[in-house]
Amino acid sequence: MMKATVRTDFSKGYAYEKKVERGLDMTTREIADAIVNDIRASWSEESPSAYGEAPAKVTGTLDRSVKREKTGRTGRGTFTSHGNAIAYAIDIKAPYAGILEDGPLFRPYFEPALIRASALYAIAYRRLF
């Protein structure tokens, strides 16, 4: 008679899952921090800045209003059906933030930082897997 047993030790799988989750959280936070740092580094040296350039840092209100915060596993609204996501929000709370970015003055600073950060995703996540 011959016998074989096939077994899976789920305890190791759980430890691996937690390690990956911590790595994803750290990576997501690093990318969000990179976006905030990019925005803060992009302010124009001249005031007023030229049309199409990032605004100048005059009083520092806009700069101080740029914040990164963890929004929980499902973020601001559900973008996953199982709640298995890690999200960080970048908030710019100065009342005139949107007007500078998209308004008639057109001093973009947020969208260019997001575009530049898109290259970070592939690099950051490649080191996890």
Image: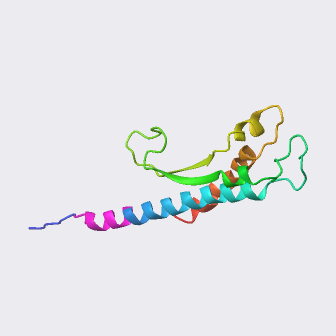
Front residue (pair 91, 2): 91
Residue drawn where x is 68% and y is 55% of the image: 64
* Residue drawn where x is 26% and y is 63% of the image: 10
Q: Is residue 65 left or right of residue 51?
A: left
In this image, 118 relative to 71: left or right?
right
Residue at the (78%, 32%) spot, across then down: 103
* Image quadrant where residue 74 sits: top left
In the image, 24 versus 62, the foreground residue is: 62
* Residue 72 located left or right of residue 50: left
Name the colouring of the figure.
Answer: rainbow
The residue range painted magenta reads: 7-17
Magenta span main SS:
helix
Q: Is residue 129 visible?
A: no
Q: Position of residue 51 (x, y in %)?
A: 89, 40
Is residue 8 covered in magenta? yes
The answer to which quarter of the image holds residue 32 is bottom right
Question: Is any part of residue 11 visible from this angle?
Answer: yes
Q: Position of residue 1 (x, y in %)?
A: 8, 67
Q: Kindly give the residue lying farthest to the top in the view shown.
A: 104
- Residue 86 part of the magenta segment: no
| Residue 9 horizontal side relative to residue 116, left or right | left
**Residue 128: where, in percent of width, then height?**
52, 64
Foreground of the two, 47 or 35: 47
Q: Kindly give the residue lying farthest to the front in the view shown.
A: 59
Residue 102 place in picture, x, y as percent:
75, 35
In front here: 4 or 69?
69
Picture residue at 68% right of the left edge, 53% below the top: 117
